[in-house]
Image: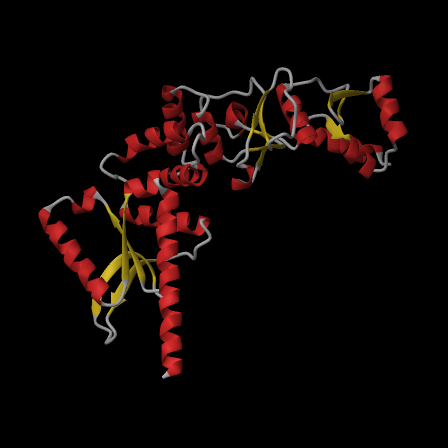
């Protein structure tokens, strides 16, 4: 056992060390129990000890709970750690997998079945929810005015883009998932008239499809006829499957000229042998699962047609 290594570990962890860590570093159970009995180490949580020379703080208690229960700092605790303007670390809030930990006095504990949807980040030596997930969690516990200030703060500071927040929203959207409606409403006010640039929206849809285990589509793809003549440029495409995706926005299409042009262009792409899918902002923001399912079905139909054609050619 190297005493200096143990003290160095405790300094990096707000004065804490776990029983498992101490054993791995060469201590025996008898030595650990002896330090606890003498008061040199104070039990901070189950299997977690704090050096008596280090005072207990919100940070040390938060870290102790994360270490003891496989928890992740969340909500207002995570907001303070990032930091997000308007929050300070004056409470302990954590998320845990379902059934992982009992109710803990003085701690706001939230069970989450969506912990696989994010990768925890470390802030001040403490594992916490990433920025986007933190904003979504906050949407479930703060009032609308504070949520709007929070969204303004992370966008203004450049910590997140609007597309980052929408990506978190659509990936976590589930029936009964608290916070989704409040965050969607807050973001919608910033997208009146679909103010998100079309190119940015295309990337947001592309990322959504990748999150649904589909390939990343080509952006601004040029569709050509068999003889090489240009037909049209589509927002997103799966060229191998000849599936095109067009994003319809009032901002770019709310006039008669565009209305007529878009439909002629769509017919030309279809006549060139492509399947054309059209989606609106509502499809993306409110029905992301249906959007992905439609694209997946179109790709599967294309593959089935290709196989059938290959079989016909083989038989001939």
What colour scheme was applied to this rendering of the protein? secondary structure
Which quadrant is the C terminus positioned in? bottom left
> For the point 23% across and 44% down, which residue is it?
249
Judge left or right: residue 39 versus residue 112.
right
Name of the residue lying farthest toward the right? 30
Residue 258 higher or lower than 241, as above or below: above
Name of the residue lying farthest toward the top? 106
Quarter of the image where one finds residue 125: top right
Residue 4, x across and y down, in percent = 81, 33
Judge left or right: residue 279 versus residue 57.
left
Name of the residue lying farthest toward the left? 256
Which quadrant is the N terminus positioned in? top right
Judge left or right: residue 255 versus residue 276.
left
> For the point 39% across and 82% down, which residue is it?
315
> For the point 15% across and 44% down, which residue is it?
254
Instruction: Report the number of numbered marks.
Output: 0
Quarter of the image where one finds residue 64: top right
Name of the residue lying farthest toward the front? 315
Kindly tell me whether residue 152 is visible in this rendering. no
Residue 237, x across and y down, in percent = 33, 59
Quarter of the image where one finds residue 218: bottom left
Residue 30, x across and y down, in percent = 90, 28
Q: Nearer the viewer, residue 199 or 169?
A: 169
Residue 128, x across and y down, in percent = 57, 32
Kindly tell me whether residue 309 is visible in this rendering. yes
> For the point 17% across and 47% down, which residue is it?
253
């Amino acid at each position: 056992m190297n005493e200096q290594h143990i003290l160095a570990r405790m300094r990096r962890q707000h004065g804490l060390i776990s029983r498992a860590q101490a054993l791995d570093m060469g201590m025996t159970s008898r030595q650990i129990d002896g330090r606890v009995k003498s008061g040199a180490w104070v039990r901070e949580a189950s299997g977690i000890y704090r050096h008596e020379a280090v005072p207990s703080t919100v940070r040390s208690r938060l870290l102790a709970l994360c270490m003891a229960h496989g928890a992740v700092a969340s909500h207002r605790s995570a907001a303070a750690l990032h930091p997000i303007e308007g929050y300070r670390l004056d409470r302990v809030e954590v998320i845990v997998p379902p059934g992982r930990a009992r109710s803990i006095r003085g701690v706001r504990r939230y069970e989450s079945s969506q912990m696989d949807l994010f990768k925890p980040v470390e802030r001040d030596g403490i594992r916490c929810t990433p920025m986007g997930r933190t904003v979504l969690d906050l949407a479930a516990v703060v009032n609308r005015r504070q949520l709007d200030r929070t969204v303004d703060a992370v966008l203004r500071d450049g910590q997140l883009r609007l597309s980052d927040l929408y990506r978190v929203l659509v990936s976590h959207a589930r029936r009964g998932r608290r916070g989704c409606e409040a965050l969607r409403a807050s973001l919608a006010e910033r997208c009146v008239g679909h103010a998100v640039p079309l190119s940015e929206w295309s990337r947001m849809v592309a990322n959504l499809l990748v999150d649904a285990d589909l390939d990343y589509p080509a952006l601004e793809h040029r569709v050509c006829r068999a003889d090489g003549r240009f037909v049209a440029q589509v927002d997103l495409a799966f060229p191998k499957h000849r599936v095109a995706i067009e994003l319809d926005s009032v901002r770019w299409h709310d006039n008669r000229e565009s209305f007529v042009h878009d439909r002629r262009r769509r017919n030309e792409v279809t006549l060139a042998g492509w399947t054309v899918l059209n989606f609106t902002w509502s499809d993306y923001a409110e029905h992301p699962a249906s959007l992905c399912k439609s694209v997946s079905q179109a790709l599967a139909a294309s593959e089935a047609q290709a196989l059938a054609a290959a079989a016909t050619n083989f038989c001939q």
